[in-house]
Image: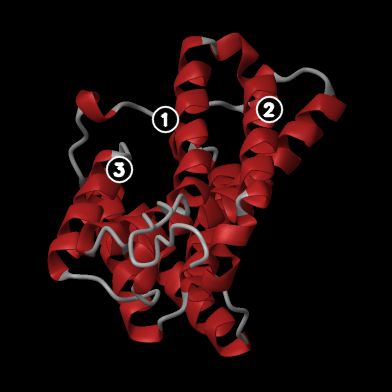
Amino acid sequence: MEGNETKGTETPVESRAWIGYVVPMAAFMILTAVEGSMPKQYVWLYIAKAILVTVLLIVGRTTWKRDVQWSLSMLLIGAVVGLVCFAGWVTIDPLTPHFKILGNRTEYNPFKEIADPSVRMLFLAVRFYGLALMVPVMEELFWRSFLLRWITDQDFEKLPVGTFSWGAFAIVAAGFGLAHPEWLVAILFACAMALLLRQTKSLFACIVAHGVTNLALGIFVMVTGNWKYW
């Protein structure tokens, strides 16, 4: 007999895959709160936030990279959905009552606040990177890839991307709305992203749609000077 065998009694190792989805979002939210308390340091805090969140996304990539599959058809679908969502955002939100409890965006005009042209250009480049790439990847990973599945089944890794319950759909839409001052259009946007995900099974399509919406909002802000959407 070869010693004491323990087959059938091993305790499975607890999955920590959630860390790759949650930590970047948590860091982003904490540093955003810090920005609000230190408005004079907003430029450098935002740049530091963009760097840190990007590093965390890269470090956690092994847990989520299989969720994001490139597809030309999904690129086109995502772009169209993103433009529709942008149109809805700037059309519906001005007609929506806002609540102080949900906070306010920093109406930061870099052309007024930043005297040094080189610093201004650096900020704008990082800000548009954050709008069009970092935030869409971070938020879609957290809200649509992780949270929709985790609320549906806490062993979320066994569920294919795009599989979720309607209860999870409602909770995530509400949570996404409460996380934005533009609560109504944010809820509608979350519903659109979840339905796009359910229909296409493509998180890549959602990231593209989110990125196009944010990029269009950024351009809209620059053209109109409507800094409340910044």
Q: Is residue 73 above or below residue 88?
A: below
Residue 130: image location, x then y, percent: 62, 45
Report the disc number at residue 2.
none
For badge 2, the amino acid type reads: Ala
Q: CA distance from mark 2 to mark 1?
A: 19 Å
- The mark nearer the N terminus, 1 or 3, is 1
Residue 134: image location, x then y, percent: 60, 50
| 139, 81: nearer the viewer | 139
- Please tell me which residue is depicted at 36% across the width and 54% down the height of the picture: 11
- The mark nearer the N terminus, 2 or 1, is 2
- Please tell me which residue is depicted at 42% across the width and 30% down the height of the picture: 105
Q: What residue does disc 1 label? A: 105
Residue 132: image location, x then y, percent: 60, 54
Secondary structure state at the residue bearing disc 1: loop
Q: CA distance from mark 3 to mark 2?
A: 25 Å
Q: Are marks 2 and 1 in contact (CB under 8 Å)?
A: no
Secondary structure state at the residue bearing disc 2: helix
- The mark nearer the N terminus, 3 or 2, is 2
Report the disc number at residue 48.
2
Within 10 Å of the Cα at label 3, are there few (<14), some (14-19), or many (20+) other Cα atoms? many
Secondary structure state at the residue bearing disc 3: loop
Q: What residue does disc 3 label? A: 182
| 24, 182: nearer the viewer | 24
- Please tell me which residue is depicted at 55% across the width and 26% down the height of the picture: 108
